[in-house]
Image (cartoon, coloured by chain):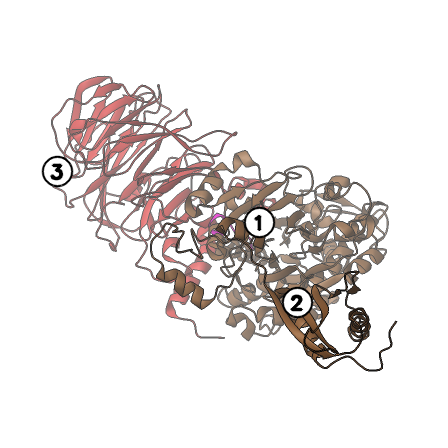
Amino acid sequence: MPEIKVTPLGAGQDVGRSCILVSIGGKNIMLDCGMHMGYNDDRRFPDFSYITQQGRLTEFLDCVIISHFHLDHCGALPYMSEMVGYDGPIYMTHPTKAICPILLEDFRKITVDKKGETNFFTSQMIKDCMKKVIPLNLHQTVQVDDELEIKAYYAGHVLGAAMVQIKVGSESVVYTGDYNMTPDRHLGAAWIDKCRPDILISESTYATTIRDSKRCRERDFLKKVHETVERGGKVLIPVFALGRAQELCILLETFWERMNMKAPIYFSTGLTEKANHYYKLFITWTNQKIRKTFVQRNMFEFKHIKAFDRSYIDNPGPMVVFATPGMLHAGLSLQIFRKWAGNEKNMIIMPGYCVQGTIGHKILNGQKKLELENRQTVIPEYEPGWSLEVKLQVEYMSFSAHADAKGIMQLIRMAEPRNMLLVHGEAKKMEFLKDKIEQEFSINCFMPANGETSTVATNPSVPVDISLNLLKREMALGGPLPDPKKPRTIWRASLRLVSPEQALKELGLSEHQLRFTCRVQLQDAHSDSDTHIRIYTHLKSVLKGYTIQHLPDGTVMVESIVIKVSSSPEEPNTKVLLLSWSYQDEDLGSFLSTLLKKGLPAALSSM
Amino acid sequence: MYEISSDENEFEDWFIESLKIYSNIHEYQLEHPTRVIEWTGEKNVCVAGYNLSKNEILELLLPLKLFADDNQGLCAERDFKVVHGGFTDGSIHCLKHIPGTRCVVTNDGSSSKLQVWDVGGDDCDVIKKTGDIHLKTASLDKGVKIDSPLTGNASVLHGSQVNDIQLTELTSGTPLYTLGTDIPDVLSSLRFVSGSVFLACSVNGDVYVGDTRSPSYLQKSPAGGREGNHWCMGVRADSSLPEPSSCSVARLSSSCQAVVSDLRNLKSPVCQAQLNVQRKTTSDEFLIVTWAPALDNCLAVSGFDGMVQIYNTASWRPELMEFQPIFIHRGHMMSDAHFDTSSSVVTTHVWHPSRPWTVLSAAGDGSVHVWDWVDNTTASSKSLA
């Protein structure tokens, strides 16, 4: 029975290390290769020993697919490809390919330089890994090899995020990665056609969440900014170049006038340069199913938002600044933070996750005193012994767009999978969801634990063409039961492919052999045996590559064709050649009879 | 900039205003609307659908950010978590949690049968039905009102009319008390004020006081010819006292009148008011009035339209006068998908048992809101001014 196997890799039930192995139609595919951000030891990497105990992964995997650039989906990729070893193709969308290496390098710098880790990938490894990447376009089928094809669909969530369909023959799997079903200010909602995959794979954490509305998150952001500015404070918002920064800028711009705000809003020039560079990628991405209103506005032509200059850091009075990098681990955002942290009127708003080891991570854990550690080589301009008291207000706001319980049901309705598979959940805490999916869609819902394999039986179809006449004849025969006098082509709508011998046996027919014979007259004065030899020699010279035999009883055989020579009783010097061949050698038989009717060449010598 | 329609302007006005009038607000969209919100813990509520056939019951965990108080800034968690869920074969019009247990009791609004459910613990997330309680009632097709005593063994008080009010023990189904009367008036509300004293409000506005320790005891306070053909009741008792000496009873009519009485003298109302409401719906089924458990003289009304209105009764007078609300929650009318202000009716609302200004409300479009409103009228307000 054909089947598809799905195994989420890694130990523990935690979310935060997406890496799923799929075996389909004899192919092995790795979906995502994420790092678990909460561990400092090998538990942060997926457990590749499931694939092979030692050695490289290349021969065990047909391809690797990365859904988007978040580190819990791609953070372990350079480790897997360069340290464990994989040389096959790695697929991801164009924006993911552009942004991944930057996040990986930042992550590497923080982990190695700040935390002093040694068992980690190097900058060169990131570069070597990215050389193996083949970029994907949306809705374009890519042939990985003769049998395996993949296609990317728009997922929303972040720039470049994709849901992926993997297909071998008529079996297919769709992996959602992270996605959202409601559009926001700069990204659209996920979309997929009714592709009816055998399995739809998604995160279980969404299914038990009901998300607070986007407008309440935005309201909270505006309120905090407004409160701070009203009391004369400064607001720092550390951001990555692209994505949330635009979202929040559009939000502030939309309401600044209505709220009668006079304080200046700035973004750092580093942000603009990077953003403009990615904007070109972004715009081709957004042309696919993105809201028209967003595309209409020029990315950084805001009425109220201006470019920042370092000299403004010490300006008195309230202001709002967007600056990179997003985790406060270096650069301008850290420089500004150092200046503003000591004043309780100020505020810092962190719009995303911060990796362990960064200052962003520390202040989000409530740390009120920061000290420069010995290994702070990333910011050489800061003197050792640097310490800082954190008095400003710290706000952690999550803007990332995720689907929820309702969204998962919408996606299932869109794709119409035959089975559902949820990863990263505890089965006993997911029984209600399983029941719900099974009741509403009448499909099975699988929930493998990390390291556990789910096997899903599939029913692949073999398409068969049927002639119109046969179909018409079939339809003319009425009645449901088979009648031996009126053989049916289709009974119970099942078709089997069998050998001729078995077919004859089942149908109760005997096999007939068809043989053709023909007589050719030749003018030839030689003896019968000499004529035999002359025929044999002639045919051997003409029919090179065929099996020609001269048998002791005087027969010449060409393949299955038999040629016998006899003298004509009435006419001396006339030979009669009897040719006989079976139906299968019809072509050759006809050819021989025509050839021999022309006679034998005179120049043939007897052997 | 593109042209903004007047509807979008209204939304933006409300959005900007919301920065000042709420200290917190969260908005959720359920797959199907609910008309019940029932506390099953300090941070948990149960909701359930009211489609004619299959529905879901869900137990939801409120967002952690709401409870983080001083550490609110560091907590990014804004979402509901579905902690338990189950399926029902019928509609749910009434859902009551039995204190001290993990049980809830439901009724479908068109029969007298009660369903008993086990919401479940840590080891399983499925809400399972554990049994039915079949009741002898005078009317077979009206729904049943339910309440549970504040103390004592697990039991449930139920009735569709005054003459079939009964207290039933939960596990055995044994009737513990029946009200001996033949009054056929249909009930709109049923509430315990102590372990044994309860109030029943009939649709015509009459309030009855009963005591489950004495079946023959029944005290009636007529509505006294007031306007309105449908009344409901909200009760605020000081539950720290074993016997209620002070207990405020509010009655709300379908013609937007509110009457406040004290349990000690139900016949003469303490004060009353004509509420400033423009009715958007003709149905009375969602009318509800509640007292804030942790604030004085604060009551909330909903069910006339897409708003929840909060009034302070301290300034009300014995003679009927019109009063303005001190707060209006308009969130359910401000739908992102369409700015139609007339469509969605608030189906129910509840106050948090201990957080003074926290309210949960639900509407017919499936929305559920959790909000902390700012009281700008009193000295202890948390306003931004």
Please identify the quarter of the rendering in which residue A141 is found: bottom right
Task: List the residue tagged with mark 2.
Answer: A580
Q: Horizontal and vertical percent for residue A378?
A: 83, 54
Mark yes or no: residue B314 visible.
Answer: yes
Mark 3 crowd level (few <14, some 14–19, many ≥20, 10 Å Cα): few
Which amino acid lies under the numbered mark 3 shown in the image of this protein? Gly
Residue at far front of view = A570
A52 left or right of A346 in image: right
Of A194 and A386, the residue lying toward us: A194
Mark 1 crowd level (few <14, some 14–19, many ≥20, 10 Å Cα): many
Q: Is residue B186 above or below residue A420?
A: above
Report if residue A524 lies within the magenta region: no
Which amino acid lies under the numbered mark 2 shown in the image of this protein? Ser
Q: Which of the two marks, 3 or 2, is nearer to us in this view?
A: 2
Q: Horizontal and vertical percent for residue B158?
A: 25, 29
Spatial distance from mark 2 to mark 1, Cα to Cα? Answer: 64 Å
**Local secondary structure at mark 3:** loop
For chain A, the rendered hue is: brown
Please identify the quarter of the rendering in which residue B57 is found: top left
**Which of the chains bears the disc numbered 1?**
A
For chain B, the rendered hue is: red
**Local secondary structure at mark 2:** strand
Spatial distance from mark 3 to mark 1, Cα to Cα? Answer: 64 Å
Task: List the residue tagged with mark 3.
Answer: B224
Residue A201: assigned label: 1
